[in-house]
Image: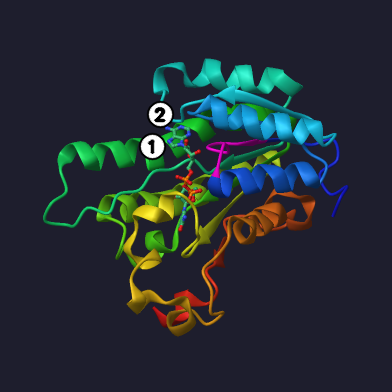
Amino acid sequence: MENLLNNKVAVVTGSGRGIGESIVRTLADAGAKVVVTDIDIATAQGVADDLCSKGMEAKAIKFNVADFENMKANVDEIKNLFGRIDIWVNNAGITQAAKIEDITTEQWDKIQSIDLKGVFFCTQAVIQIMKEQNYGKLVHISSMAGERGGRSSSPSYSSAKAGVLNLMKCFAIWGGQYNITSNAVCPGRTVTQMAQGLSWLHDPKDDPKLTIPLCRFGTPQDIANAVLFYASDLSSYVTGDIMEVNGGLYMTR
Ligand SMILES: NC(=O)c1ccc[n+]([C@@H]2O[C@H](COP(=O)([O-])OP(=O)(O)OC[C@H]3O[C@@H](n4cnc5c(N)ncnc54)[C@H](O)[C@@H]3O)[C@@H](O)[C@H]2O)c1
C-alpha cells in the first residue's frame, strides 16, 4: 500500500487529533503529500512536523470549516501549498450529548454549522478545483447515528450526519461527469477525545464484549483504513457509497 497515493495531494479537515489524525497519517503513509488542517493549529502543526521528521511531505494550516465568509480564499490557500487537491476528507466535527427536551437553538445551530453546513461549503469550494483537474476523491465522515438516530449523541448531531449522507450523494451525482467520486464512512463507537463525553464509553451496559459482534470499540485506524480505499483509485468505480465501520454494531443495535 506504500505507493498507492504517490503524486496525490490529500487534505483532511480536523486532522490535528483523533480520527482525522489517523486518516492524514494513513494517507501520508500511502505516499500522498498531505495538508493537516484544523481549527487548532498547534495540534495540526505537531502532526505535520512529525510526518516530515519521518520523511513524508506534510504541511499544516489553520482552517475553520465554519468560516463561510472566507471559505473560497482559505481553500485556494490550501490548494496553493502543493498546487492541487486530489483528495479531500470532510472529517472535522463536534458532537453534543444533549437530550431532546433540553436542546437549545444555539446548540442546534452550532452543530449544524460545523457538521453539515461546513461539509457543504468546504466541498463547494474544493469541487471547483477538482472539476478543473478532472479528478477528485471526496470522502465524508458521517456516523452510524446519521443512519440510525442518535442515542448517546443528540438529534442535532444525528440529523446533521444524516444530511452529510445526502450531500455525499448529491456530490456523487454531479461529480461523476468530472471524474470526481464522493463516498462516506460511518464510524460506530470509536475511542477518541470526542467519545469521552458520550455515555457508551463509560456505561457497563455498553460493554463492547456484550454489545458489539467484534467485541471491541473501534480505533481511529479502523476508520482511516476505510477512508484509504475511497481516497485511492482502488475505488475508481465506486461513488455514492457508504462504508459501515462499526464492528457489526449496526446489526445488533
Ligand atoms: N468518535 C466517534 O465515536 C465517532 C463516531 C462517529 C462519527 N465520528 C465523526 O468522526 C469525526 C472525527 O471525530 P473524532 O472522534 O476524531 O473527534 P475529536 O473531537 O477527537 O476530533 C475532532 C477534530 O476536529 C477539529 N475541529 C472541531 N471543530 C472544527 C472546525 N470548526 N474546523 C476545523 N476543525 C475543527 C478539532 O479541533 C479536532 O482536532 C467527526 O466528524 C465525528 O462526528 C466520530
Horizontal arrangement in the rendering, residue 106 relative to residue 205 (left or right): left
Q: Position of residue 203 (x, y in %)?
A: 33, 71
Magenta residues? 11-17
Ligand 1 neighbours mark 1 (CB distance < 8 Å): yes
Q: Quadrant of the N terminus?
A: bottom right
Q: What element carries label 2?
A: loop
Q: Where is residue 81 in the image (x, y as percent from the top left)?
A: 71, 20
Image point (46%, 64%), residue name: 189
Q: Where is residue 158 in the image (x, y as percent from the top left)?
A: 33, 56
Ligand 1 neighbours mark 2 (CB distance < 8 Å): yes
The residue carrying mark 2 is 66
Query: Which of disc 1 and disc 2 is earlier in sequence?
Result: 2
Asked if the magenta segment contains residue 141, the reply would be no
Horizontal arrangement in the rendering, residue 111 relative to residue 211 (left or right): left
The residue carrying mark 1 is 114
Cα separation, mark 2 vs mark 1, equals: 5 Å
Image point (69%, 31%), residue name: 48
Q: What is the magenta segment's predominant secondary structure?
A: loop
